[in-house]
Image (cartoon, rainbow, N blue to C red):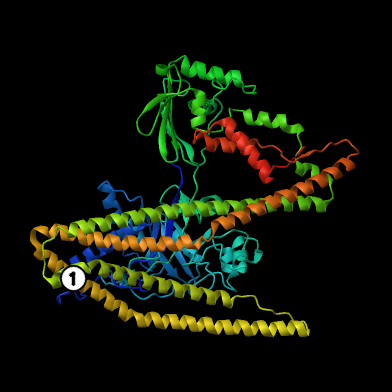
Amino acid sequence: MAPSASFRKCDFQVHSCRDPNWEGQRPVGIGDALTGGKKATAVDVEAARKAWAKGLVDKCVHKGLRAIAITDHHEMVMVRYLIDEVQSRMKAGKDPDLWVFPGMELTLQGGCQCLILFDSDLEQRWWTQAIGTLGINHAALDETAAKGGSVTQLPYPYPDIATRLDAIKELKGRFIILPNVSGGGQYTVVTDGEHKNFREMPYVGGYLDKGQNIHNLQPRLKTRLSGTDSTWGNRLIYPLPTTDSREAGYPRLGSNDTWIKISGSTAESIRQAFLGCDSRISLAIPAYPSIVVRSLRVKGTHPLEDMELDFSPEFNAVIGGRGSGKSTLLEYIAFGLGRSCFDLTDKPYSGLTRLSELVKETVIAKSGEVTLVVTQDGADFEITRAATTRFAPQVKYPNGKKEILTPKEVRALFPAVAYSQGELSELGREARDKTSVDDLLTFVRAPHKSEADEADSAIKKAKNGMAKVARDFAQLWTLTAEKAKAENRLAAATARITALQSTLPKLQDSDQATLDRNQDVVEIGQQAERQKADLMELQELVEEVAGRLATTQRLRSELKDVVITGVKTSSEKVLAQIGVKVDALNAELAAGRKALNPGYGKVEKFVTDHKKAHDAIVSKIGAQRTVAKQIAELQKTSATEKDQITQLAKKIAALGDLNKRYREARAALKKSVDDQAQGLKGWASQIEQLSSGSVSVAVADDGDLSDIYAAFDTLAVRTHSQEGARNKKLGERITLDGFGARSIR
């Protein structure tokens, strides 16, 4: 079975500490001064770089990243350290499930920038070959220095990158080029006059710098990327968000919130994701079904011999020639779920007897065995149907307990929809005499058809609004739960600190004071780091505002009218005033950050000096040294938990009054449904008149509620509520709310 693709959280523009634009302290290079006046040796450099790699992998794991690309400017020196760290953990049985793509950031003719990503398993000798082929002077590179060399523009246009590398057999198909398609800035390829290169480039995707995604791009830029403007080409070029992370500690890493569905750590897998971006790239956490069939195992059956298949939690396709067992496979899955033709003997389906006999002859008569593993809400359930239980389903629960159920009980426990071969097409043929409202409206004048489409769009928009509120409620509950857990962890750590401190021996007042304020010192150090990162993010936001302001629509009409002239003059004045203030704020932020840097350095030194004093006291305590170290670790944990609680509280506050938003969204949905009902009734009357009585149209206010009841049953099964009572209450509530579904026939 082919490996299935899955969504991975990705950040494809991450720079190492050697990048020329790195912010913060760098690991040492050969000859750099060390503490005590010594010069760094090759051993020191290797150790420092391995420590950097370890820290970055830890940060990726912490932020849920499962694929990153290291994209330093015109070099790939640091990539191997990260790959080695991941492989080392895998060998030790601590797989971080992190794919590392070797890559570079390239600056080409005209200042245009591109990212190049290679297969993760491409041998390092081909990295060097690629660098040379691209015209980068690799020989002049000092790989032992702390900082990479200055960047020199490559003297050719960015569409030529692929042509150069494709000439090397071992590289062809093993890299992907992503041009910079950001809005604003001097390095983007989507600027006025660049349309020819953009239209003719062989690339299928692009990337965006920090803070940008497809939702906040300027309309003009979206159009250029959409493939609808022939000047810029007829292909959609999806703009992939990145963080452009290049700061010590990587505070922005993973904040691009991008998930890509890829099947392997190859450039081709990424290329396929861009080609199917609608379903393979997501800027929200991918939602998986709450219940999926994870695997199927059959024994002693025919025509399917002993076999075991694993399934993707998403879409699966069964492909094979006539008689290869496709229908049998699907019927076995349905058999495991208690939904086969053998179980549902009253299905209105012509193939019922044939497929029921299939199960009897190939499984039951041969004393075969069918086992499904079903994952529901993250927990695995094993369903086995075998001769040992007279082919009644035996369910093994996640806690190991086994229970024999009836097929009906299995269907209630695992709600699913299953169709046998040909059943869907048969249902479609039976429904051909029923005409949809859209088909009927073709007999009505065009404006009414347009209004019908608008009514459907309004309902869809209102439903999306309700869904957004529901998602925000889910996020609120998740954030609240995380905050409560963090508060509990903080309380536990605080209690442990208090208990452990009571076991320490009596110290001199000055030593005791140093230990007592360790918590506060750790917290102020973390707070200073957070403030520094927040100020940097704030300045980036101001810079983004400046870029958006520069591209704000101007009034360019040449109409000689006093009103138009007055508005043009006023708007230009307002925009100019805002621009001055934004530029002033940007300059003030830059100056303020620069002015604060010495202070942050002092805080860092203060924390470092305190730690030395603290560690010195701990070393004197003797037998209680372990306890003191444990207290220090708990104090550090407490500071981290406090910071997390603060950040979670900010996110919760940002969601606003969800109850109010729910009421507004619900009212909007009700209005859109009511509006559609009124339209349907009017159109129904016209259709009857136009047909001279040949067509009878009825609009039912309550409509078909079966889908609502089915969805409610699925939910209620898990609460073990009584079917009759819950359906009665649901009907009463729907009537009370005036939310009857309208249908037309």
Q: Quadrant of the C terminus?
A: top right
Q: What is the quadrant of residue 559 in the picture?
A: bottom right
Q: Is residue 349 visible?
A: yes
Q: Is residue 732 left or right of residue 413?
A: right
Q: Is residue 162 left or right of residue 522?
A: right
Identity of the residue furthest to the top in this view? 365
Q: Is residue 129 left or right of residue 513?
A: right
Answer few, some or many: residues within 10 Å of disc 1's Cα (few below 14, many 20 plus, some between 14 and 19). Answer: some
Where is residue 376 shown, x and y percent of the image?
A: 45, 37
Q: Which of the two residues, 465 or 55, is positioned nearer the viewer here?
A: 465
All told, the count of numbered labels is: 1
Q: Which of the two residues, 563 or 175, is positioned nearer the viewer here?
A: 563
Where is residue 257 shown, x and y percent of the image?
A: 46, 58
Residue lying at 68% horizontally and 45% vertically, measured from the top left: 739
Where is residue 1 shown, x and y percent of the image?
A: 44, 36
Which SS class for mark 1? helix
Residue lying at 53% horizontally and 75% vertically, measured from the top left: 545
Q: Is residue 557 left or right of residue 18?
A: right
Residue on which the image places disc 1: 514
Q: What is the quadrant of residue 396 in the picture?
A: top left
Type of the residue with mark 1:
Thr
Q: Is residue 186 visible?
A: no
Q: Which of the two residues, 454 or 36, is positioned nearer the viewer here?
A: 454
Q: What is the quadrant of residue 663 in the picture?
A: bottom right
